[in-house]
Image (cartoon, helix red, strand yellow):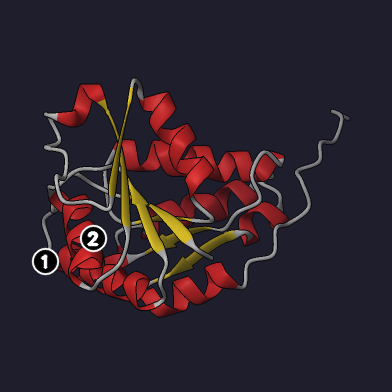
Amino acid sequence: MDSIAVFCGSSIGASEAYKEGAILLGKELAKRNITLIYGGASVGVMGTVADTVLSEGGKVIGVIPTLLEEREISHKHLTELIVVNSMHERKSKMMELADGFIALPGGPGTLEEFFEVFTWNQIGLLQKPCGILNINHYYDLLIELFDNMQNEQFLQAQSRNALLVDDDVTGLLDKCAAFVPPAVKTYQTNK
């Protein structure tokens, strides 16, 4: 894998663990020569992971819509900053540039971005790893929801198994590197 898109918050969060996790991820991305693709902000978890990759000699490409360029305080020292017209263009560009996706702690925007790439994988528009770095048990309830989706037959086992989860940066990146895309979702007619 040459690049990973990281979806995460433009806030730093309530726990120091979120910042620490972003730093660990940034260091490991730089160590593995994996380009960080992210939302382009200089603040929050987003800014922390970008600053870390840069300080470790890595490459960072930010993608930010004009609407958020000033609001999220776009990062001025990236390898490349791509300014787009809309949130849709942002996600499209990140999907194009990335070989895989990781969600760090964040809010509804983080989830929306992650769910879109996960769904696109599920229906075969993408075939790239989608992982959750479960820092400080932040995503425990979401993981439980995915399990419930499978139990209630709204998510096929092959798709649930394609959701890569780890609380360790190295473990998650290793899972992303070893990812084999599952079969595309199939449908059954109503009985």
Label 2's element? Answer: helix
* Label 1 sits on residue: 16
Quadrant in the rendering for residue 111 = top left
In this rendering, position of residue 7 left or right of residue 43: right
Crowd around label 1: few <14 · some 14–19 · many ≥20 (10 Å): few
Residue at 81% from the left image edge and 41% from the top image edge: 186
Residue at 84% from the left image edge and 28% from the top image edge: 190
Residue at 62% from the left image edge and 59% from the top image edge: 162
Return the x and y of residue 166 as percentages of the image width and height.
43, 71
Crowd around label 2: few <14 · some 14–19 · many ≥20 (10 Å): many
Residue most toward the front? 79
Q: Is residue 20 above or below residue 45?
A: below
In this rendering, position of residue 14 left or right of residue 89: left
Residue at 12% from the left image edge and 29% from the top image edge: 71
Q: Earlier in the sequence, mark 1 or mark 2?
A: 1
Identified by mark 2, the residue type is Val
Return the x and y of residue 135 as percentages of the image width and height.
29, 66
Q: Quadrant of the C terminus?
A: top right
Identified by mark 1, the residue type is Glu
Q: Is residue 136 something that shows in the picture?
A: no
Mark nearer the viewer, 1 or 2: 2
How many numbered discs sit on the rendered protein?
2
Q: Is residue 88 something that shows in the picture?
A: yes
Label 1's element? Answer: helix
* Label 2 sits on residue: 49
Q: Quadrant of the N terminus?
A: bottom right
In this rendering, position of residue 184 left or right of residue 148: right
The disc placed on residue 116 is none
Quadrant in the rendering for residue 84 = top left
In this rendering, position of residue 50 left or right of residue 61: left
